[in-house]
Amino acid sequence: MNLKAGQYIRHSTYGTGTILERDEERTTVEFDTAGVRKFVTSLAAFEIAEGEAPLKKKRGSKRRVKATSVATAA
């Protein structure tokens, strides 16, 4: 099977995920519920999953707003 980075796959233990990197030695997959896992490419058993990967929230993009006190004249 010729899988490549960005492809949506299914694994029997971890469920569905997206291939992040793949070379002759290692395959890195970010699973929808199990996080990032690395596999030995020659031993990994994946199936092509139907549908598309769910959209992920961007991490670290939240910006905290600093609270400021407002002085009111009485």
Image (cartoon, rainbow, N blue to C red):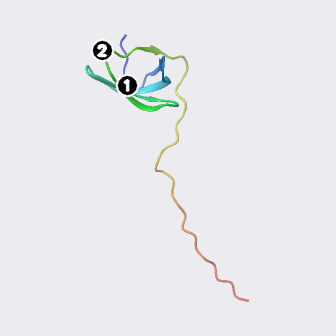
Residue farthest toward the front in the current orientation of the protein: 13
- Location of residue 2 with respect to 8 vertically, above or below: above
Residue 73, image x and y in percent? 70, 88
38 lies left or right of 62: left
Q: Which of marks 1 and 2 is nearer the N terminus?
A: 1
| Residue type marked 2 | Ser
- Expressed as whole percent of the image width and height from the top left, the position of residue 43 reads 33, 15
Q: Is mark 2 on a helix, strand or loop?
A: loop
Report which residue position mark 2 lands on.
42
Give the residue drawn at x 63%, y 78%.
Answer: 70
60 lies left or right of 28: right
Outermost residue on the right side: it is: 74
Q: In which quarter of the image is the N terminus?
A: top left
**69 to the left or right of 61:** right
Near-viewer residue (24 or 11) = 11
Callout 1 environment at 10 Å: few (<14), some (14 to 19), or many (20+)? some
Label 1–label 2 contact, CB within 8 A? no
Which residue, given by chain and number where applicable, does mark 1 sit on?
A: 5
Assign the C terminus to one quadrant of the image.
Answer: bottom right
Q: Which residue is drawn at 54% across and 34% down?
A: 55
Picture coordinates of residue 32, whole percent (x, y): 51, 30
Q: Is 58 situated above or below 20? A: below
Q: In this view, does 19 lie above or below 57?
A: above
Q: Position of residue 7 (x, y in %)?
A: 43, 22
Label 1 secondary element? loop
Residue type, label 1: Ala
Quadrant hosting residue 27: top left
User: Which of the two discs, 1 and 2, sits closer to the camera?
Assistant: 2
Instruction: Count all numbered tags in the image, as a single digit.
Output: 2
